Image (spheres, grey):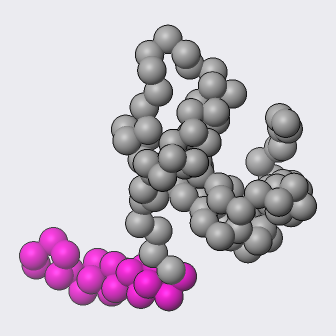
Amino acid sequence: MVAAFKTFYGVLAEAARWLSSLGVTHVAMEATGIYSMPVYHALIEHGHFTQVLVCNAGHVKNVPGRKTGLADAEWLAHLLECGFLRGSFIPPADIKAARYCSDGCLDRQGWWEGE
């Protein structure tokens, strides 16, 4: 089954609930930099999944010549089903907050530049 959803957060939350209602337990997606984070957070916050993986695009390259969104999705599903995928590290919210705070403190103090 194929469905398309817009990338507004409310719609992403609806997509996560829809996937959960279909009985989906594991989700894998290709990392697209910061653009994959709203999708990841919607899946985590609004879905009931055993596992949500954001995978490095270089690790899940498909066979050349079959570049469509549907073919890539099928390939990711196959790799996930076989247990060949490893998700990227996404720090929990408290670690993200600590990183953000410490980066700001270091920059303001001039420590980062070696001043």
> Foreground residue, 95 or 79?
79
Asked if residue 109 lies left or right of residue 29, the reply is left
- Could you tell me how many numbered marks the image carries? 0
Q: Quadrant of the C terminus?
A: bottom left
x and y, in percent, of residue 57 in the image: 44, 40
Q: Quadrant of the N terminus?
A: top right
Residue 84 visible in image: yes
Q: Residue at x 47, y 27 (%)?
A: 62
> Foreground residue, 88 or 101?
88
x and y, in percent, of residue 47 in the image: 78, 68
Determine if the magenta segment contains residue 100. Answer: yes
x and y, in percent, of residue 79 in the image: 51, 42
Residue 13 visible in image: no
x and y, in percent, of residue 28 in the image: 59, 51
Q: Residue furthest top?
A: 65
Asked if residue 63 lies left or right of residue 102, the reply is right
Range of the magenta residues? Answer: 93-115
Query: Up-down: is 84 above or below 46?
Result: above
Q: Main secondary structure of the magenta part?
A: helix
Query: Up-down: is 54 above or below 63?
Result: below
Asked if residue 23 lies left or right of residue 49, the reply is right
Please identify the quarter of the rendering in which residue 3 is found. top right
> Foreground residue, 17 or 108?
17
Q: Residue at x 52, y 55 (%)?
A: 54
Query: Up-down: is 32 above or below 61?
Result: below
Asked if residue 21 lies left or right of residue 106, the reply is right
Q: Residue at x 45, y 58 (%)?
A: 87
Query: Up-down: is 10 above or below 78?
Result: below
Determine if the magenta segment contains residue 32. Answer: no
